[in-house]
Image (cartoon, helix red, strand yellow):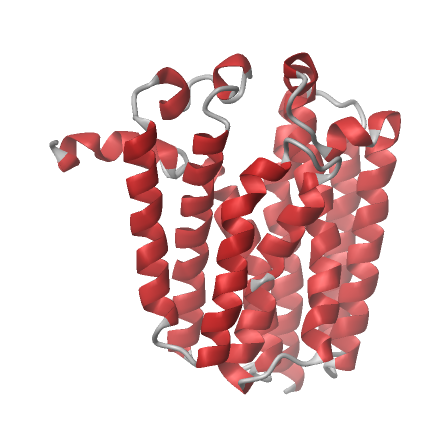
Amino acid sequence: MNIVARLPVYAHLIRVDTLDKQAGTTLLMWPTLWGLWIAAGGLPPLHLVLIFAFGSFLMHSAGCVLNDYADRGFDAHVERTRMRPLATREASPREAMWLAAFLLFVALLLILALNALVFWLSLAALALTLSYPFTKRFLPVPQAYLGFAFSFGIPMGFAAVQDTVPGLAWLLVAGNLFWVIAFDTAYAMVDRADDIKLGVIRSSAISFGRFDVLAVMLCYAVFFTLTTIGGLLAGRGWVFLAGMAVAAAMAGYIYTLIRGRERARCWRAFVFNNWVGTAVFAGVALDYLVRG
């Protein structure tokens, strides 16, 4: 097999063929970074920042491949996913699994540079990543399960800096879980009609029914409340609160995108959540920079 010739296929599998498809990587990275900044008191070591940023890319990429493998029998029937390599048979299931294994192996090498607690937490994160794609068969709100997977960078960041995971880290995890439910419900709203036709894929967009928009906004409210409490408990002040206020205003804009439940606008809402994460991170980082 000519690996170089296969690179465009692998790029499609891990969603680096277009920039907007990397939204998942940054949505995974932002809470990891704001947790790392809080854990380190605003001055995280550069090597930890690089490890967790690159690790977010690797884990999201592996998760995409595993998700496509699990859904390979359904993706051809969904408008948004019908051209994915496993759906079109441009890539084989075996090839996809080798790619996922390689990505996870590289991620493991990064983790081995850190302490034992981070390693054990990474095993829990791996279990969540491997099992999530199959939860869409039986959980009414698999986005909650995904929320745990997307939040594990927070306790791992605390463990890497402090060699312990305090209650504050788990409070931030709880808040982030609701953010994930919010933005991934918008994502699921894109595919809702196709998922209903298939009858085998479950999602919060289906389970929430006509209350989907309300549920998304309530999840944002819980996210902002818990994260703000977490920031205040960490000693953050007005710069952090300003960042949270900007992020909350962005959630208001997201409401205008999803209220009509149009596919394209729901996708825009999902991608736009990166600006929400950016605002929260900027509030945390700048608060430490300005106030110490």
- Please tell me which residue lies in front, 258 or 194: 194
> Would residue 268 be seen by someone viewing this image from the given angle?
yes
Q: Measuring 75% from the left and 60% from the top, which residue is drawn there?
A: 175
Q: Quadrant of the C terminus?
A: bottom right
The image quarter in which residue 288 lies = bottom right
Q: Residue furthest left?
A: 2
Q: Above or below — where is 193 with respect to 203?
A: above
Q: Percent from the top left, x then y, of residue 169?
A: 67, 73
> 32 or 141, which is in the foreground?
141
- Position of 292 relative to 2 (above/below): below
Q: Residue at x 35, y 67 (%)?
A: 110
Q: Position of 206 compared to 288: left or right?
A: right
Q: Count the marks: how many? A: 0
Q: Residue at x 80, y 40 (%)?
A: 216
Q: Position of residue 193 (x, y in %)?
A: 69, 16
Residue at the (12%, 31%) spot, across then down:
1
Q: Residue furthest front?
A: 138
Q: Position of residue 139 (x, y in %)?
A: 71, 37
Q: Quadrant of residue 100?
A: top left
